[in-house]
Amino acid sequence: MDGDTYTLHGNPAEVESSTVVFRADDIVFNRETGDLEATGHVFFHDFVKNQRIWASHLTYNTDEETGKFYDVVGETRPHIVAKPGILTTNNPFHF
């Protein structure tokens, strides 16, 4: 194991910051580069954007906040700015 690379196996393994959480069967995280790979029953939650994503696996860079998710199911509550004549709802968007 590299000095800044951590391999986690768990039920589930978890990496959490103040803005996101990753849960999966296996996670490999490099603190120096911010690269994270998760496999098996992956769950991702972005607290700021209120996004929840379930996937088979993912690659993600925590510094750039970008990644690829595979075999995805997800949901979010979009931020809607109400204007006169526009209908709004509190129901989440599911994709």
Image: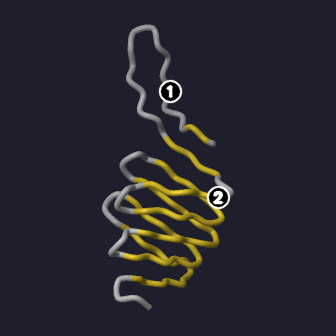
Q: Is residue 51 above or below residue 44?
A: above
Q: Secondary structure at mark 2?
A: strand
Q: Position of residue 17 (x, y in %)?
A: 34, 65
Residue at the extreme bottom of the image, as rendered? 1
Q: Position of residue 87 (x, y in %)?
A: 50, 17
| Circle 2 residues within 10 Å: few <14, some 14–19, many ≥20 | few
Q: Which amino acid is tagged 2?
A: Tyr
Residue at the extreme top of the image, as rendered? 85
Per the image, the residue denoted by label 1 is 89
Tag nearer the camera, 1 or 2 = 2
Question: Closer to the N terminus: mark 1 or mark 2?
Answer: 2
Specify the quadrant that holds the N terminus: bottom left
x 56%, y 72%: residue = 24
x 61%, y 41%: residue = 94
Work out whether residue 31 or residue 80 is closer to the camera in this orientation and state it. 31
x 66%, y 65%: residue = 56
- Checking the image for residue 70, the label placed there is 2
Q: Position of residue 5 (x, y in %)?
A: 41, 83
Q: Secondary structure at mark 1?
A: loop
